[in-house]
C-alpha cells in the first residue's frame, strides 16, 4: 500500500509538470477511522470510514497555488493539475517562493 501511495503522489506531480508547472510537489493522505458507542453493555452505534486525498502545490515561476481533492481518477487528477496551474499563474509572485536549492 505504501508504494501505491508513493506512485499516486509521483504520478500526480508528473501531471502538474506536464501541464506546465515550473515545479510541483504532491501529498497523499489516507485515513481509517472507527467509532463505537456502547450503552448499558449493548452496542448502540458502530461506524467505520476510510478516505484518501491528494494535495498538489505547483509553482509557475515565483508564483504558487495549492489544491486538494479526494477524487483520485487519472482524469480528475489531470483536471486538478491544470486547474492549480492556472491558479498559480494568476497568483502574485513571491521572491521567497520556490523549491529549496540543494
Image: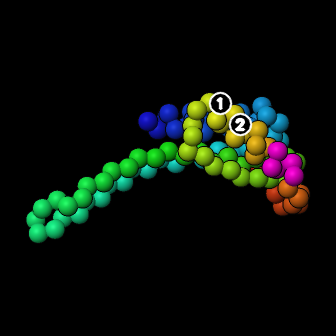
Please state which of residues 23 and 39 is positioned toward the viewer in this rendering.
Answer: 39
Magenta highlight range: 86-90
The question of residue 76 being in magenta is answered with no
Can residue 23 be seen here? The reply is no
In front of the other: 71 or 15: 71
Q: Which mark is residue 54?
A: none
In percent of width and height, residue 45 lies at 24, 58
Quarter of the image where one finds residue 34: bottom left
Residue receiving disc 2: 79
Comparing 88 with 39, the one in front is 39
Could you say where residue 2 lies in the image, as x and y percent from the top left?
A: 46, 38
| Quadrant assignment for the N terminus | top left
Question: What secondary structure do most residues of the magenta stretch adopt?
Answer: helix
Q: Are marks 1 and 2 in contact (CB under 8 Å)?
A: yes
Q: Which residue is mark 1?
A: 75
Question: Can you say whether 62 is above or below 42 in the image?
Answer: above
Residue at 57%, 37% (x, y): give it.
72
- The kind of secondary structure element at disc 1 is helix
Looking at the image, what colour scheme do you see?
rainbow
Q: CA distance from mark 1 to mark 2?
A: 6 Å
Residue lying at the far left in this picture: please name it. Answer: 41
Q: Quarter of the image holding residue 6?
A: top right
x, y percent for residue 94? 87, 60
Amino acid at each position: 500500500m505504501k508504494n501505491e501511495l508513493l506512485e499516486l503522489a509521483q504520478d500526480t506531480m508528473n501531471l502538474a509538470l506536464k501541464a506546465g508547472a515550473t515545479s510541483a510537489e504532491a501529498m497523499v493522505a489516507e485515513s481509517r477511522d472507527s467509532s463505537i458507542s456502547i450503552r448499558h453493555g449493548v452496542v448502540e452505534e458502530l461506524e467505520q470510514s476510510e478516505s484518501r486525498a491528494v494535495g498538489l502545490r505547483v509553482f509557475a515561476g515565483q508564483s504558487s497555488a495549492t489544491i486538494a481533492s479526494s477524487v483520485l481518477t487519472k482524469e480528475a487528477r489531470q483536471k486538478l493539475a491544470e486547474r492549480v496551474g492556472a491558479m498559480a499563474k494568476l497568483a502574485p509572485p513571491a521572491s521567497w517562493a520556490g523549491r529549496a536549492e540543494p
